[in-house]
Amino acid sequence: MGRYLVTAGLPYSNGRLHVGHIAGCYLPADIWVRYLRLRGEEVRYVCGSDDHGVAIMLTATKEGKTPAEVAHFYNQQHQLDFKGLSIDFDVYGSTSASKFHRTASQHFFLSMLEKGLFEKRTTRQFFDEARKMFLPDRFVKGDCGFCGAVEQNGDQCESCGKLLDVDSLKNVRSTLGSEDATVPGTAGVVTVRETVHWFLDLSRFQPQVEDWLQQAQLRDSTRVYVKSLVNNGLVTRSMTRDIEWGIPLPIDDPDAKGKVLYVWFDAPIGYISNTMELMEREQASEKAEGACGEYEQWWKSKDSKIFHFIGEDNTIFHCLIWVAMLSAEGTFSLPSGVIVNQFLNIQFPDKDVEKISKSRGSAVWIGDYLQEGGDPDILRYYLTSIAPEKARTVYKPEDLIQKNNADLANVLGNFINRVLSFNQKYVGAIVPDYDPKKCDVVDHNFVNELKRTFIEATEALDNISPKHALQILMDFARSCNKYIDDKKPWSTRKTDMELTKVTLYHGIRAIYFLTITLSPFMPNKTKLVAQMLDIDLAQCNWNSAIDEFPVGKKLGEPVILFQKI
């Protein structure tokens, strides 16, 4: 049995969750965690909200709240959305409310400072003249000085992937607007001013990053992208910011006054502090300074494998900066893998494909979907079937309806209902006791296909491709309907009931197989099927999916699994 720590990117606690967030990392991670547990592995699934940064400060000012109140509100909203979709974390923490996070983050900073890895220096930074404040990267836009792409954020070009700064971002403007401007007529105006910050030279850790890239489990597209960044050379980046809301610098220096850690310095440390919180909750032993010692078995042991699931916009932070930070601190394990999904775009009827956008209203919000009666498993199925694992894909509301009706109702639901209803009517509420000598080549081929499907789906999930695994399993569900059509039990029951029992037995065995193997994807619907089979899914494991189903076993009442929309 292995030990796996699985994390999903910490959602920023400044807005609601939409389908793009879920498809990007939370759902694929949840599916993989459920698969690992079925396989008998020891797993912890860790997440929590990313609470710091200027965006939350601005929202708080606008709404007349404190930043902590804003962060807490969205932390709670996110938890409701995740629960509604049966995305089950072992812990969902908060970088602002955790009693471990400040200490853990400041430890990283001080550890690097003591090793002489930070350089304090005066630097030039974008300054919003309207609000009289220094601007974090994400609140300036301009043109990339390398490739010319327009409307790029101040930290990285989405087009060429290169890091941007005050010298390489052109035609710069502030994205904060004119509200609360202290100087009339300066809205959007950006200048460059000097300030003092602490810089980390990432190039010092280029060998470690290169070695990690050779060994880590990554999608091919991720490896190619990160290698191109590394080949261009890693840069020196400021790890502090001029704002009030964040983790204060833990040093006695006049220039440190009013400085906090860069949000992308403290955010990934949230994986660690959330694990500490989980370990305390599990009544693990504690060590000095309030830190929960048992977290080390997950973060500092060679027996543990750490996997981060993220969206593509977080690649540089997890595959470069985070790996460099861990290497610099020196006592924590590097991630075994970083699983990156691309962006999910959206297309409403009679409209063009566009990016999911809060400001433009082009989104399907999880809270709205659930409040309007949307089935969580249908959304889980649809988002997995179109998962942007290798390339950007498109969410289409009418496509969700079509896949529910064609795949779930007509294929999977139809197969389960027709077999169990027919069996109840002509055999009874038990698994038929069949004569193996009655099995023909069609039956043997069907069993072989079930076993082959198991091997292929297992390989796909081992390679962390839930999308491919789901395709394989649904192809088998289509074969199940073909098997019933070929065997024609409605005809054979008139002439040879023993032959009919062979067909029904293999149909029920296939339902059992699909119930277990599809449970990571649709945990609620498969629980209903488990009730029809009168089995406890919690007592099943992945390998038991290919076991023969016991003849003579009592069955539950068949019900319609999926309604057409």
Image: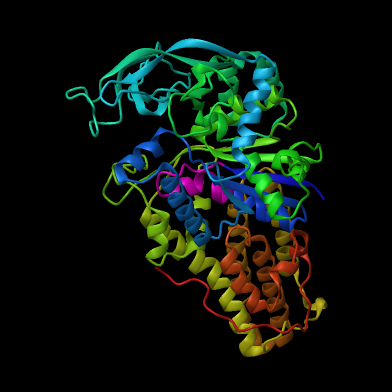
Bounds of the magenta segment: 9-28
Q: How many marks?
A: 0
Q: Residue at x 81, y 76 (%)?
A: 436
Residue 275's place in the image compared with 542, above or below, is: above
Answer whether residue 466 is visible to the viewer in this image. no
Compared across the picture, whether 4 is left or right of 385 comes to right
Nearer the observer, 197 or 55: 197
Task: Name the spot of residue 56 as percent of width and height, x first.
Answer: 40, 39
Image coordinates for residue 66, horizontal then vertical, percent: 39, 44
- Residue 284 highlighted magenta (yes or no): no
Whether residue 409 is visible: yes
Residue 12 is inside the magenta segment: yes
Q: Is residue 371 left or right of residue 469?
A: left
Quadrant of the rendered image containing residue 308: top right
**Which percent across, then down, holds residue 389?**
54, 41
Looking at the image, residue 565 lies above or below residue 520: below
Residue 155 point in image, percent of width and height: 44, 23
Vertical placement of residue 85 versus 324, above or below: below
What coloring was used for the rendering? Answer: rainbow
